Image (cartoon, rainbow, N blue to C red):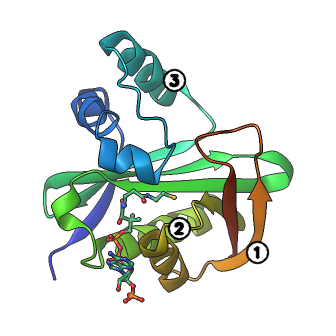
Amino acid sequence: MKRILLRKIKLSDKKYFARWWRDKELLKLTSGILKLISDEEVEKYFSAIIDNLTDYHFMILLDKKVIGHITLAKRKNDWYETQIVIGEKKYWGKGYGTKAIKLLLKKAKKFGISKIYLEVRPTNTRAIAAYENAGFVRRRIKKYPKNKYLSKTLRMELKL
Ligand SMILES: CC(C)(COP(=O)(O)OP(=O)(O)OC[C@H]1O[C@@H](n2cnc3c(N)ncnc32)[C@H](O)[C@@H]1OP(=O)(O)O)[C@@H](O)C(=O)NCCC(=O)NCCS
């Protein structure tokens, strides 16, 4: 198996997001909002990531190639929320997502983070399997009746 590494996000990574945030297959599995965003919106959302001082953002590298993005975002009561996207789709289902999540958990432990959760589309069985591989457990279904793009999620948790 090739080597998976995480490295801190940098300004020149914007090009990956500009592509991934416009990929309908990816959007269907994440926000569900398929409307294509403008260059200005990409700039705005990417700046929000880069300027944020409380969250951790890492790029996922396969050997030296960037294939995805993984985050730990600070939430209430010492909880952190994680999200992962392997934007380069040909690398799905090869164990790389599981590996990246495990590497993130190692970093979280070093940062003194002990409570991590995520929310995933209940139909996203590949993501759920990857999270379970890394030690997350299913907790409950959360309903968002006002969100027509994502009306329910599965909350999964892990305590380090
Ligand atoms: C979710 C994601 C990060 C998982 O990473 P990955 O490298 O594809 O996943 P892995 O190969 O590590 O693990 C996938 C698991 O799902 C299983 N799987 C693979 N293809 C599958 C498929 N088409 N349907 C269901 N399960 C599948 C694998 O067998 C594996 O489980 P196992 O180890 O118990 O056998 C990646 O697929 C991705 O970025 N998807 C698009 C964005 C997304 O859904 N993000 C998550 C939003 S919450």
- The amino acid on which the numbered mark 3 sits, given as a three-letter code, is Ala
Report which residue position mark 1 lands on.
Answer: 139
Along the horizontal axis of the image, is 154 left or right of 140? left
Where residue 80 appears, as percent x and y from the top left, is 68, 54
Along the horizontal axis of the image, is 122 left or right of 66? right
Q: Closest to the observer: 103 or 87?
A: 87
**Which of label 2 and label 1 is nearer to you?**
2
Separation of residues labelled 3 and 2 (CA atoms):
29 Å
- Labels 2 and 1 touching (C-beta < 8 A): no
Image quadrant occupied by the N terminus = bottom left
Q: In the rendering, which numbered label is found on residue 123?
A: 2
Along the horizontal axis of the image, is 20 left or right of 35? left
Separation of residues labelled 1 and 3 (CA atoms):
30 Å
The mark nearer the N terminus, 3 or 2, is 3
Q: Residues within 10 Å of mark 1 (few under 14, many from 20)?
A: few
Image quadrant occupied by the C terminus = bottom right
Q: In what element is the residue under mark 1?
A: strand
Report which residue position mark 3 lands on.
Answer: 48
Where residue 46 appears, as percent x and y from the top left, is 41, 25
Q: Residue at x 51, y 23 (%)?
A: 48
Q: Quadrant of residue 19?
A: top left
From this viewpoint, is residue 112 visible?
Answer: no
Separation of residues labelled 2 and 1 (CA atoms):
15 Å
**Which of label 1 and label 3 is nearer to you?**
1
Q: Residue at x 38, y 54 (%)?
A: 85
